[in-house]
Image: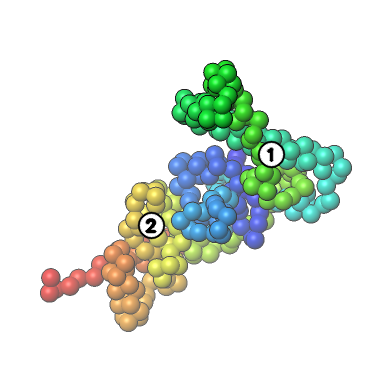
Amino acid sequence: MKIHLTLLNGTGYVFDANDYMELRTKHRIMGALVGTANSKGWSCSEAALPVELSKCETQLLIEEGIADLVSKTAALTAPPTDEMVQAYKAQFEASLMAQADALKAEKLRETERHVEKILQGKRNKLLKQGKPKEAAALTANDVLQEIANSVVFERQNALVELPSLHMTNHSARLCTDPVYDTSSLKYRVFHDLWLRGKFVSTGEAFGADFLVYPGDPLLYHASHIVIIQDAPTIRPMELICKVRLSVIVNKSCVFAYEEVESSKIAYQTINWCNPSK
């Protein structure tokens, strides 16, 4: 079964955690987590779903038949029907009630852990008030019932989804137009590296076109930076600059270009040699 990518900002987005894990573990497609994981704002170290795929990744998944790209614009911009609004309100209320029940259950679990100490404290208090009969009659169940009755769920502290009157499931239109030029050298290099079993991500942060990893980037650092050349020639000063850059970031420098005779993608790896060491 194909994975459905949602078209946003000209590329594919993944909103389902299972789809994301399948893309990452089975198809070596990483994308970038761009969701907000906390109330303090976005942080790259605490990012969450959705996952934004690059245009190269999106086009590759479509071309390989792994995923379909769909647009939900028409469904999300159309006013919701009365039935959809009522269903949303019912779902919202159910979510709040579930959180209230979870809060009460957690409070009771915590009370049960210390119920003997709480019970003894309440009995001592009643004895000081001159109520020995009430103190003797007090049981652990009375304490738990008192806690259950006192739990108040404040709705302003509830965890809620982004405000929307639209339900989770939407109708969508299949997008067949390419999101990236498949004849471009950059896409062909990305596709070729992927077919070779590599983990490939954008290399803009390192002054390159791509980064190549020996395994999942969660476990490995990038081993190579890939720089795309329109021609199999390069000026000496530019060559020195690119290779020195790879030395600084502790990676091998790979130049990718198209062979003139065969029109195939070729790679040239260059390492910096320091005779003084």
The residue depicted at 66 percent of the width and 38 percent of the height is 152
* Image quadrant in which you'd find residue 146: top right
Outermost residue, front side:
130
The residue depicted at 38 percent of the width and 71 percent of the height is 232
Q: Amino acid at mark 1?
A: Leu
> Where is mark 2, residue-wise?
212
Q: Amino acid at mark 2?
A: Val
The residue depicted at 64 percent of the width and 47 percent of the height is 157
Camera-nearest residue between 39 and 203: 39
Disc 1 element: helix
Camera-nearest residue between 187 and 132: 132
- Above or below, comparing residue 26 to residue 220 in the picture: above
Name the spot of residue 205 as percent of width and height, x first: 43, 67
- Above or below, comparing residue 9 to residue 194 in the picture: below
State left or right for residue 94 relative to residue 248.
right
- Above or below, comparing residue 30 to residue 277 in the picture: above
Per the rendering, the mark at residue 266 is none
Name the spot of residue 130 as percent of width and height, x first: 56, 26
Question: In which quadrant will I find the N terminus?
Answer: top right
Q: Is residue 67 visible?
A: yes
State left or right for residue 59 relative to residue 264.
right
Question: In which quadrant will I find the C terminus?
Answer: bottom left
Per the rendering, the mark at residue 96 is 1
